[in-house]
Image (cartoon, rainbow, N blue to C red):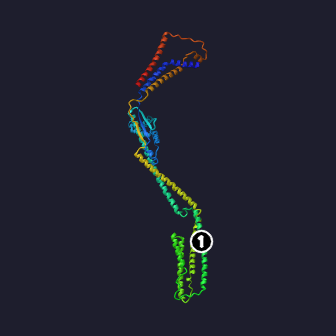
Amino acid sequence: MQEILEQIFGYLKGIWNKRWYAMGFAWIICIAGWGYVYNMPNQYQSTGKLYIDTQSLLRPLLRGLAIQTNVEQQVRLMVKTLLTRPNVIKIINIADLDLYVEGDQAMNGLIKSLQGKIKITKTGRENLYDISVHHTDPEIAQRIVQATLTVFVENTLGEGREESDSAKKFIDKQIKEYEKRLVKAERKLTEFKQTNYEMLSSGQGYYSQMKSAQSQLEQAKLELKEAIENKIALEEELEDIEDDIESYDLIPSPTSGPAIASSYDARIVTLEADIDNYLISYTEKHPDVISAKRLLERLTAKRSSEIAAYKSSKKSNEDVISADVGNNPVYQQLKISLSQASAVVQTLNVRIIEYEARYEKMKKLVNTVPEIDAKLVALNRDYNVTKDQYNKFLQKRESASISRSVDQTTDSVQFRIIEQPRVIDKPVGPKRILFSSLVLLVSLGAGMGVSFLLSQLKPVFNSVHAISQVTSYPVLGTVSAISSPAQKQRRMMMALSFFLLLMALVAVYSALMAWYYF
């Protein structure tokens, strides 16, 4: 520790020995530094306070009807992007600063300068901003702040309207695109239904329809079997009655003969009644109606042939006496029943043929139906999805139209300038007191540094210990120098002069501080 203290004292003695260099260097730096600080141009600050009110009364009323934009986020984004190059160019044009620059290089320098000078700070209250500018000309500073406020307000409102227009254009474009898709999907679905209308499910599934057709076919076959048995029984009874009647010799009355009738009259009457009943429930193109009409035509033709044959036989055989079978009521009733049974058999045959064709057709298409149903489901799904999106875009367009009307009639953001920018006569900078103090400290430190450097370049032994440490030899003794009174007086004068110069430096500094302060 003793060695460190001795070394420090040795350095201080070396600096003291070179003190005049330190003083001269300090004076040079102070004079140059204080002169530069004094000649620094004054800086004037202009400040404007802006409050942005984003709490509009219409926003809760229009919730769900109009598009709600995040106004606060939009304002924050505008604050961050306010000092971009395009916005700074607008500020320069509004403040007429472009009149003072010529050439692109000067303009670029002005833009960079303004980007560093314009300060936007948010105060403690929400959405309350301070916009301040430092400039050598107070009027220019005021114009820059005013132009910045103008650009901030215009860009915020203009950006909202531009976003609204862009959103409306995008929605209109999407509506046209989805309208084309919807028309295309509707056309595909309609064409598919028209092509496969027979195999599409209507009320029941296709397999249920096929099972129902099979049940109808089996029921018709059973009914046909019953009708054939009934017809056979009627024919046997009719043959028995004819055999019984032929055993009698019936002599007809010469004055009154039998009426001209045929064995098909009853069947024709019954068939006509059946056709009338069919037409109540079915159309002319129903298989039962068509088969009944065909049978009626055949019976009518046979009746005409029978009447013609009867008339011919009567003319050629007037003397032949035949039995009048037609007057037997049991015989006539059996003939009618037989005709009805034959008609039922014919009808059932036609019905079975139709049911068999229908059932066979459905059996052939049983493997194709699932694919058709799957395609129908896919087409319906695509159509419903497209329709839902189309309806959503229509709703969005209505919301966008309402939002645009609201933006045109009212402002969702209210700008209130709390404090207008003013021209301030008193400069706020530069801080000459601080800079002058720093110049003084730097000059003293630099002077001491120069003295220390010179003392190290031309070292002087200031103690016995230093000699012993450098030479590594023991010091046996020292010889003290005895100064004369004149030498002592001269050293005192030199020391006094040094302190006077130092005090003069401090005095000049104090005078500058008083000048700057008052």
Image spot of residue 238 (x, y percent):
60, 80
> What type is the residue that disc 1 sits on?
Glu
x and y percent of residue 114 in the render? Answer: 43, 36
| Left or right: residue 422 compared with residue 382 | left
Query: Which residue is painted at 59% across and 72% down in the image?
Result: 224
Q: Say if 362 sits above or below 154 in the image.
A: below
Q: Quadrant of the C terminus?
A: top left
State which quarter of the image contains the N terminus: top right
Give whichever of 87, 302 is nearer the camera.
Answer: 302
Q: In which quarter of the image is residue 362?
A: bottom right
Q: Is residue 305 above or below residue 183?
A: below
Q: Residues within 10 Å of mark 1 (few under 14, many from 20)?
A: some
Taking depth in this image into account, of 402 and 59 the one nearest to the observer is 59
**Residue 360 visible to the viewer:** no
Which x, y percent locates residue 225? 61, 72
Q: How many marks?
A: 1
On the question of residue 507 being in view, the answer is: yes
Q: Could you tell me residue 478's position as x and y percent?
A: 57, 12
Report whether 62 appears left or right of 459: left
Secondary element at tag 1? helix
Q: Relative to 371, does residue 44 appear above or below in the rendering?
A: above
Which residue, as the protein is rendered here, is positioned at the far bottom?
319
Determine which residue is flagged by label 1: 223
Quarter holding residue 104: top left
Closer to us: 512 or 444: 512
Residue at the image position 57 percent from the left and 69 percent from the top: 355
424 is higher (above) or lower (below) than 487: below
Between 89 and 17, the one nearer to me in the picture: 89
